[in-house]
Image: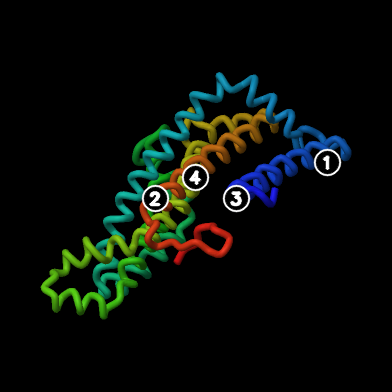
Amino acid sequence: MNSLNPKTRQRLLSATALIGFFVLWELACLASGVSDLILPRPSQIAYVLWTKMPLLWPHTLQTLYTTLTGFALGVSIGIIVGMIIGSSKLAYDVAYPLLVGFSSIPKVAVVPIFVVWFGAGTVPAVLTSMVISIFPVVVNVATGLANTEPELEDVLRVLGAKKLDILWNVSLPRALPYLFASLKIAITLAFVGTVLAETVAANKGIGNVMIIASGNFDVPMVFAGLVILAVMGVMLYSVSAFLERRMTGWAQRKDAGGSVVMA
């Protein structure tokens, strides 16, 4: 394994750790004789996924669609609000406490409000996913813009650059690492918002499947839903990480082992 490059070695170690985790899980369940109602074995979860996937697939697509829609809306709004707040010190000082207070509200509390306004279905799930995605994007974009060095802005103004030129050509590119860091957080939170709303006010989606399965004491199905959510979350996280490496390569450097780290 020492002859492999660091990235391949890291992937092999990660795969080995993942497989080892499920093997230990399986052996622990067999050795302890724990009931399926408490903790199903990975083999049972895999069997449910294999046999029930035709039924689970439409719900998977519904959850993915809802999450991506809410995530896209949340990121769009978050970038705009973050730009407004981060481009002005006064706006940053005034709005930041409001954002913290808004983020402190448990998102489960807004689901019933969305249901009253829009009825049960996809819309409350999209809005919940959107609301829960906004805060990390706003905070990171605003912080990235606010961290632009004042000396650099002064030099650019002396050279004739306008505030909009500085924002577009300097501040925004320098805020990209902050943005992509927030995207990796927001995509996982978006799934949380979607599933939360689907368990309360939806008749379709993985969250709805899990709440019905738990009511029927079908614990393997509940864990199958968790596995589907985990796989989708990892895939979208990987897409965000890939885009981050492609678009913010200038903000990264390689360490002695050859791996990429943030500069």
Q: Residue 246 carries which label?
A: 2
Tell me: 166 left or right of 35. Answer: left
Q: Is mark 3 on a helix, strand or loop?
A: loop
> What crowding class fits label 2: few (fewer than 14 Cα within 10 Å), some (14-19), or many (20 or more)?
few
Q: Is residue 45 among what the camera can see?
A: yes
Which is nearer the eye, 160 or 167?
160
- CB under 8 Å between discs 2 and 3: no
Q: Name the residue under label 4.
A: 238
Q: Residue 5 carries which label?
A: 3
Q: What's the amino acid at mark 2?
A: Arg
Instruction: Please identify, in this view, whether the residue under mark 3 or under mark 1 is nearer the observer.
Output: 3
Mark 1 / mark 4, whichever is N-terminal: 1
Estimate the spatial distance between the alpha carbons at disc 3 and disc 1, rounded to whole Å.
34 Å
Residue at left 49%, top 45%? 238
- Counting from the top left corner in percent of width and height, residue 250 is at 37, 60
Q: Is mark 1 on a helix, strand or loop?
A: helix
Q: What element carries label 2?
A: helix
Quarter containing the C terminus: bottom left
Q: What's the amino acid at mark 3?
A: Asn
Q: How is the rendered protein coloured?
A: rainbow
Estimate the spatial distance between the alpha carbons at disc 1 and disc 4, rounded to whole Å.
31 Å
Residue at left 68%, top 28%? 46
Q: Name the residue under label 1.
A: 28
Estimate the spatial distance between the alpha carbons at disc 3 and disc 4, rounded to whole Å.
20 Å
Q: Using the image, determine if residue 226 lies above or below residue 54.
A: below
Estimate the spatial distance between the alpha carbons at disc 2 and disc 3, rounded to whole Å.
20 Å
Estimate the spatial distance between the alpha carbons at disc 1 and disc 2, rounded to whole Å.
42 Å
Q: What's the amino acid at mark 1?
A: Ala
Q: Using the image, determine if residue 217 lies above or below residue 151.
A: above
Tell me: 10 left or right of 19. Answer: left
Mark 1 / mark 2, whichever is N-terminal: 1
> What crowding class fits label 4: few (fewer than 14 Cα within 10 Å), some (14-19), or many (20 or more)?
few
